[in-house]
Amino acid sequence: MKKFALLFGLAALLAVSSTVAAADKKAKKKQPPKKAQPQTWEEKKKARFKPITDEQRKSIASAVPKQATVKPKQARRILVFYRCGGFIHTSIPFANLAVQEMSRKTKAFAVDLADTYDVFTRENLKKYDLVLLNSTTHMKFENAAQEKALLDFVASGKGLAGFHAASDNFGDHPKCREMIGGQFNGHPWGAGGKWAFKLDDPKHVLNKAFGGKGFWHSDEIYQYNPDTYIGLEKLRVLVSLDMSKEAVTKPIEGKSNERYKKQYGDGPREVPVSWVQEIGKGRLFYTNLGHRDDTFWNPQVLRHMLDGLQYALGDLEADATPTAKIGKLKPALAPAKP
C-alpha cells in the first residue's frame, strides 16, 4: 500500500512538473523576441534622434538672434561635428538646427554638418574657419594624422568651439583634451533641476547676452576631473555655478556624495560653465550648456553661443587673459530665487 502511494505521488509530481514546463514553454512563445540593440553609429543616431516638430523649429528660429554682434571680417565657414562614441544627447539635432538658423538669419558664417572622422584632414579643414564639437562624446581619431590635423588647424589661427558634452572627449588624445580645457567627471547637477549661475566677469563682451546679471536655468551641469582641468591659469572663465545658493550646493552634500568631497574637499569650490582660451594663434569657446533640447530655444543662451562662435572665428574681439592673471572681479550673482 505504501509502495502504491509512493508511486502515485511520484506520478502526480511528474504530471505537475510536465504541466508547469508546458505552461512555461507556452508563455515563452507568447513573449515577443528581444529587439536587437543598435550597433553602428548610423543605427544608434537613428534610434536616438527624434524628428524636430514644426513648433520646436519655430521656437528655435524665434530665439536665434536676428543679427550678429559684429560683421564678419570675411566670409566664414563652420564645420559642426556631432559623432558620439559614448552617450548620445537628444539635443544634438536641436543644436545643429540652431547653428544653421544662426547662419541663415545673421549671415555670420556658413555651416556644414559632419559625423564621420574623414573630415579631419589637413586639406579638408582648409575650407573652414572653425570646428564646433556639438555634444560629441568619447571622440577617438582613427589615426594620428586626424589628430594632428585638428591640432594644427587651431594652432595656426583658426577656431574651436564646444557645446555641452564636447568636454566628454579625448581620453586617448590629451593634447586635444587640453584645448577644450578639461574632461567630464560626473554631473551632480542633473537636467531636471534648475540651477543658479553667476557671471564671473559681468562686463565681458561674451556675457552681454545676460545683461550683466546672474540667472537661473535648467540644464545638466558638469564638473571636471582635477587631473585634466587646466584651470584659471590658462582659461578665462565667463560663467560658473553660483555656489552661494543652497539649491546648487545641496547636490554635493551628504553621504551620497562622499566621492565628490573626497575628490574636491569639503570647502567651497568653483564649477566653471563657460570659458575661452587662446591656443597658439587660435581661439577656443566652450560652454557646458546644452544638454536639454529646450536650451536651444533660450534667447540668452543662443546669443551667448553666437557671440562665443564669433569670438572663436576671430571676428568678435574679446579679452581671453586667463582669470588668474586679471585681478579680482566682482561677479554678478543669480537672483535669490528662480
Image: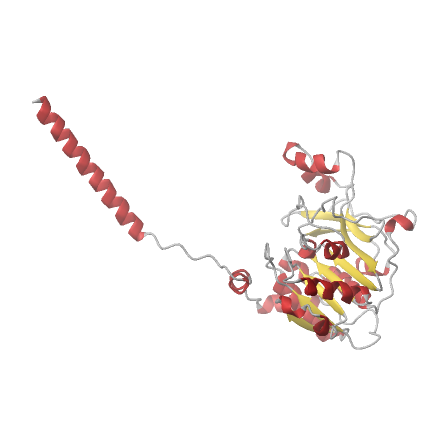
Image quarter (top left, top right, bottom left or bottom right) of the N terminus: top left
Is residue 81 visible from the viewing direction of this image? yes
Q: Percent x, y for residue 33?
A: 36, 55
Q: For the point 55% across and 66% down, which residue is it?
A: 51
Location of residue 284 by image quarter: bottom right
Q: Percent x, y for residue 241?
A: 76, 47
Q: How has the structure been colored for display?
A: secondary structure
The residue sitting at the top extreme is: 2
Above or below 102: residue 237: above
The residue sitting at the front extreme is: 144
The residue sitting at the left extreme is: 1
Looking at the image, how many numbered discs can be counted on the residues?
Answer: 0
Location of residue 257 by image quarter: top right
Q: Percent x, y for residue 234?
A: 84, 52
Is residue 307 visible from the viewing direction of this image? no
Instruction: Judge by depth and name the residue closer to the eye, 55 or 93.
Output: 93
The residue sitting at the bottom extreme is: 75
Above or below 307: residue 259: above
Q: For the point 75% across and 58% down, which residue is it?
A: 286
Instruction: Indicate left or right for 243 with 1 as reference.
Output: right
Q: Percent x, y for residue 189?
A: 67, 45
Instruction: Judge by depth and name the residue closer to the eye, 123 or 265.
Output: 123
Above or below 116: residue 25: above
Instruction: Judge by depth and name the residue closer to the eye, 287 or 67.
Output: 287
